[in-house]
Amino acid sequence: MLDDLRTHVQVGSSFAFPLDADEWDDGQRDFVRSIIAEAGRRLRGYGIVTSAQAAQRYVIDGEPYFLRGHEHVNGEVVADLAEAIEDLIQDQLPPVPVTDRHWFFGVEGGPRTL
């Protein structure tokens, strides 16, 4: 499972990461949820993370992590997204307030519906 996680980190969020597939058991889902939750907690309150800071601090298999071409990311926004993913895994996301809309997380200003 860790090899799969490393692949997803390297490829980026444009690659699907389905946790509802039959090959995942409850323990594996909880392990992934705990990693995401801990990452969100660590980023909460950190503020802006520059690409230079990320390259120095986050190294995966000997390669520095790249912020997908961005000069910086807001740690609060990433922490909000991590919380939403944790809620999704635990089936605790609130219902979308408008019919035929979907939640959109990980953006400045908090979650929106589209």
Image (cartoon, rainbow, N blue to C red):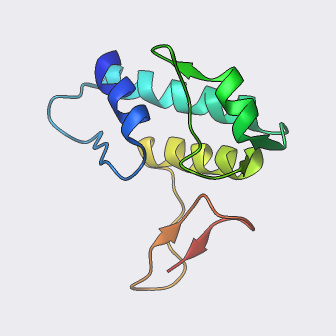
**Image quarter of the N terminus:** top left
Residue 3 screen position, x and y as percent: 30, 18
Identify the residue at horizontal 29%, vertical 48% (top origin). 16
**Viewer-side residue, 74 vs 85:** 74
Q: Is residue 84 left or right of residue 2?
A: right
Q: Is residue 1 visible?
A: no
Identify the residue at horizontal 50%, vertical 46% (top origin). 85
**Viewer-side residue, 81 vs 92:** 81
Residue 46 screen position, x and y as percent: 83, 36
* Depicted 46 relative to depicted 34: above or below: below
Identify the residue at horizontal 37%, vertical 53% (top origin). 14
In which image quadrant can residue 40 be found?
top right
**How many labels sit on residues?**
0
* Depicted 14 relative to depicted 17: above or below: below
In which image quadrant can residue 83 be found?
top right
- From this viewpoint, which residue is outermost toward the bottom? 99
- From this viewpoint, which residue is outermost toward the top? 62
Residue 91 screen position, x and y as percent: 43, 48
Residue 82 screen position, x and y as percent: 59, 43
Q: Is residue 37 left or right of residue 50?
A: left
Q: Is residue 57 visible?
A: yes
